Amino acid sequence: DTSGGTFSQSITLQQQGGDVSSTTIFVRLAAGLQSAVYTEDISLVSGGAPTQTVTVSGEVEPDTPTIFITGSADGMNYNQGNGPSSEDSFAVSGRFLTDQTISVTVTSPFEISLTTNGAFSTQVDVPVTMGSADFEDVFIRLAAGQTANTYSGTVTISSTGAADDTLTVTG
């Protein structure tokens, strides 16, 4: 019966001389509900008085799926004929995701892997557990076989419902 106080399924107001003073009742949606609109009736009952009903409603909105890249990747260099470059890394995270993975792609001539010294390609899937991924490392390098030049590329991460995030990489 107070904002920020203890909430329960019912409360009892005390009467004095047959009267109950005007009282503000605070109502909230319970924790742990699924996304939906909820409408319920609150019944006010007192012996000998007609029951009064107040209809309340509220909505639990889904959390917005979000993905993001942390870190940078640059300076992946090698002398012609000696590639690939040393690995660099960045981290991928996401919250409130519905997919089981975050897709990570990179433009050539860069390549990525989920493990250091692992199998490298231009696309990997970061696993999502219970709707989230927490700072999962992705390793990146400049692929072997490049001629002497400065290269730049783009890492893009995506997952259903989330806005893509990108990272510019150089080598």
Image (cartoon, rainbow, N blue to C red):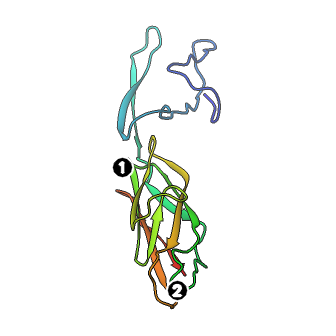
Locate residue 127, reporting x and y percent: 44, 48
Q: Which residue is mark 1?
A: 99
Which residue is rendered at x = 54% and y = 81% of the image?
170
Q: Secondary structure at mark 1?
A: loop
Exactly how many numbered labels are in the figure? 2
How many neighbours does mark 1 have within 10 angstroms: few (below 14), some (14-19), or many (20 or more)? some
Query: As drawn, is 38 to the left or to the right of 95?
Result: left
Q: Relative to 145, does residue 32 appear above or below in the rendering?
A: above
Q: Relative to 71, does residue 2 appear above or below in the rendering?
A: above
Which residue is rendered at x = 54% and y = 22% of the image?
8
Question: Which residue type does callout 2 highlight?
Answer: Gln
Mark nearest the camera among 2 and 1 is 2
Locate residue 34, reporting x and y percent: 39, 36
Question: Could you say which is closer to the camera, residue 98 or residue 31?
Answer: 98
Locate residue 59, reporting x and y percent: 40, 42
Q: Which picture quadrant has residue 82?
A: bottom right
Q: Which picture quadrant has residue 109?
A: bottom left
Q: Residue furthest front?
A: 81
Which quadrant would the C terminus be assigned to in this image? bottom right
Q: Residue furthest bottom?
A: 149
Which residue is rendered at x = 50% and y = 83% of the image?
81
